[in-house]
C-alpha cells in the first residue's frame, strides 16, 4: 500500500487532544476516531460490524500466497520482500473466493493498514469463530520478530498468516479471521510488556461485582478449570472432537452446516476424565461462568507448558460486557479450543486449563459485548462456532 507523506500518522502531541489523558485499551468509540483520523487505513470502507467493544475485525485482501513454511520477516525486511524470496503461488480470493487446504500455510495481505503514533501499540488474536474452526491465524507486520504484536508508532501494511488445521476452508476477499486491539501508553509505559490487572485488585473487583459464578481462584489472573461432568454442563455432551475427513467449510456461512458432519460429540464418563489423543482437536468448556466488567477486557492465556502436553485457546479476546446478565451474575462459559501435542494426555474434571488475564480499558466503551449488533457467543455454554446448526 502506498502511504504518502501528506498522510503521516499523528505525533503524540497532536494525538493527546483526541484521546485525552486516559491510557489503556481503546474502546469502540476511540477505534472509530482512529479510523476518522487515518490512523487505521483500509482499501475499502470499514463496515460498522467490524468494530467490536474493544477491538477491530480485520479483513482478508484480494489475494493470498501459499508458502512452504511459516516465517517472520525480521528487523531488516518487509513481508513483501520475504515473499519475493520464497516465490509463493498466488491465489485470488475475489468472487467465489478460494479454498485454503488443511495443513498448508498461507500469507494474506489484509485490507487494513496502520499509521500509529508512538503512544499506541496493538495486539492481535484469532476471532472466536476462527479458533473454534481450528484455523491457526497470526498477524505479521513488516520488520517484526514476533507474531501478533504491532509496535507503537508502526506505519505500514498488515498481513495474516493462516493455516487451517482440522478443516479445509473457503475464504473470500473481506473474510474476517482475526482481530486487533489498540493500547494507548504514557511515556513511562512504552517499554512495558505486562499490563495485567493484579490479583489484589481482581479480588476487590470480585467482591463488588462477581467475575465468576463460583470460587475465585487467582494465580496471575483468573484460573479456569475444564468441565468434563454432565452435572456441571447439564448435558451428557461435554465436548466435541473434530472429524478427520469432511467437506469444505465456507468461513462466511452462518448456520449452514450440520454439526454431525464435522464433529464427534463426546459424552461424559463416570470417571469424569477425557484422554486427549495426539494431534486431535477438541472443543470443551470451562467450569466457571464469567463476567467481564465494562471497564476491563480480558485475554485467555495458555496454561504453563510444564503443566500439560496440550495447547488451549487460540482465540483469546474477551470483550467488556461478555457474560453479562440482568441479575448481575456471571452468565457465559469460556469455550476452550484444545489440541494435544506428541503424547496422549489425561484431562480430569476440574483440572486447571488456562488463565484469564484482565487489562484496564482507557475508558469504558460506548458499546458492550452483546448490547449491539450480532454477538454469537453471549450467554454461551459449550458451543461450536456460528457456522454449525445442532439438531
Image: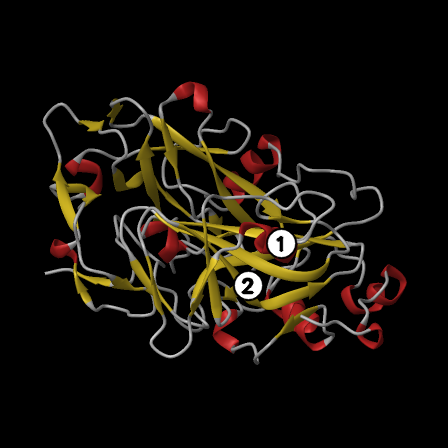
How was this image coloured? secondary structure
Q: Secondary structure at mark 2?
A: strand
Q: Which mark is residue 109?
A: 2
* Image quadrant assignment for residue 314: top left
Q: x, y (%) of residue 234?
A: 16, 44
Task: Locate the N terminus and report the quarter of the image it occupies.
Answer: bottom right
C-alpha gap between disc 2 and disc 1: 9 Å
Task: Locate the C terminus and report the quarter of the image it occupies.
Answer: bottom left
Residue 383 shown left or right of residue 207 in the figure: left
Q: Secondary structure at mark 1?
A: helix
Among all residues in the image, which is located at the extreme top?
A: 306
Q: Residues within 10 Å of mark 2 (few under 14, many from 20)?
A: many
Q: Which mark is residue 79?
A: 1
Residue 317 shown left or right of residue 348 in the figure: right
Q: x, y (%) of residue 226?
A: 30, 33
Q: x, y (%) of residue 355?
A: 46, 34
Q: Report the residue at 55% width, 65% height from top.
A: 110
Q: Is the residue under label 1 in contact with that under label 2 (CB below 8 Å)?
A: yes
Amino acid at each position: 500500500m502506498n502511504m504518502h507523506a501528506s498522510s503521516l500518522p499523528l505525533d503524540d502531541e497532536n494525538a493527546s487532544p483526541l484521546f485525552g489523558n486516559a491510557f489503556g485499551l481503546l474502546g469502540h468509540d476511540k477505534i472509530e476516531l482512529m479510523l476518522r483520523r487515518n490512523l487505521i487505513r483500509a482499501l475499502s470502507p470499514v463496515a460498522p460490524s467490524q468494530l467490536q467493544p474493544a477491538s477491530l475485525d480485520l479483513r482478508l485482501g484480494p489475494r493470498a500466497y501459499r508458502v512452504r513454511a511459516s516465517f517472520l520477516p525480521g528487523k531488516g525486511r518487509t513481508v513483501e520482500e520475504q515473499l519475493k524470496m520464497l516465490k509463493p503461488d498466488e491465489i485470488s480470493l475475489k468472487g467465489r473466493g478460494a479454498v485454503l487446504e488443511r495443513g498448508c500455510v498461507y500469507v494474506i495481505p489484509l485490507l487494513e493498514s496502520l499509521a500509529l503514533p508512538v503512544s499506541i501499540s496493538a495486539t492481535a488474536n484469532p476471532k472466536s469463530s476462527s479458533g473454534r474452526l481450528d484455523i491457526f491465524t497470526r498477524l505479521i507486520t513488516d520488520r517484526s520478530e514476533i507474531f501478533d504484536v504491532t509496535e507503537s508508532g508502526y506505519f505500514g501494511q498488515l498481513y495474516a498468516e493462516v493455516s487451517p488445521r482440522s478443516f479445509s476452508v473457503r475464504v473470500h476477499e473481506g473474510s474476517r479471521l482475526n482481530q486487533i486491539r489498540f493500547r494507548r501508553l504514557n511515556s513511562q509505559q512504552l517499554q512495558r510488556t505486562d499490563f495485567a490487572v493484579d490479583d489484589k485488585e481482581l479480588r476487590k473487583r470480585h467482591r463488588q461485582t462477581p467475575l465468576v459464578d463460583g470460587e475465585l481462584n487467582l494465580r496471575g489472573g483468573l484460573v479456569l478449570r475444564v468441565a468434563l461432568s454432565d452435572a456441571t454442563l447439564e448435558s451428557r455432551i461435554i465436548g466435541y472432537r473434530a472429524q478427520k475427513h469432511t467437506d469444505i467449510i465456507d468461513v462466511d456461512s452462518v448456520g449452514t452446516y450440520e454439526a454431525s458432519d464435522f464433529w464427534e460429540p463426546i459424552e461424559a464418563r463416570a470417571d469424569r476424565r477425557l484422554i486427549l489423543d495426539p494431534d486431535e482437536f477438541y472443543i470443551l468448556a470451562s467450569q466457571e461462568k464469567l463476567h467481564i466488567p465494562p471497564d476491563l477486557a480480558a485475554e485467555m492465556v495458555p496454561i504453563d507448558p510444564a503443566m500439560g502436553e496440550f495447547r488451549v485457546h487460540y482465540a483469546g479476546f474477551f470483550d467488556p460486557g461478555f457474560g453479562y446478565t440482568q441479575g448481575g451474575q456471571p452468565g457465559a462459559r469460556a469455550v476452550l479450543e484444545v489440541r494435544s501435542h506428541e503424547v496422549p494426555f489425561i484431562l480430569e474434571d476440574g483440572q486447571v486449563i488456562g488463565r484469564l488475564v484482565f487489562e484496564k480499558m482507557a475508558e469504558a466503551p460506548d458499546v458492550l459485548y452483546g448490547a449491539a449488533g450480532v454477538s454469537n457467543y453471549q450467554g454461551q455454554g459449550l458451543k461450536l462456532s456460528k457456522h454449525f446448526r445442532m439438531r
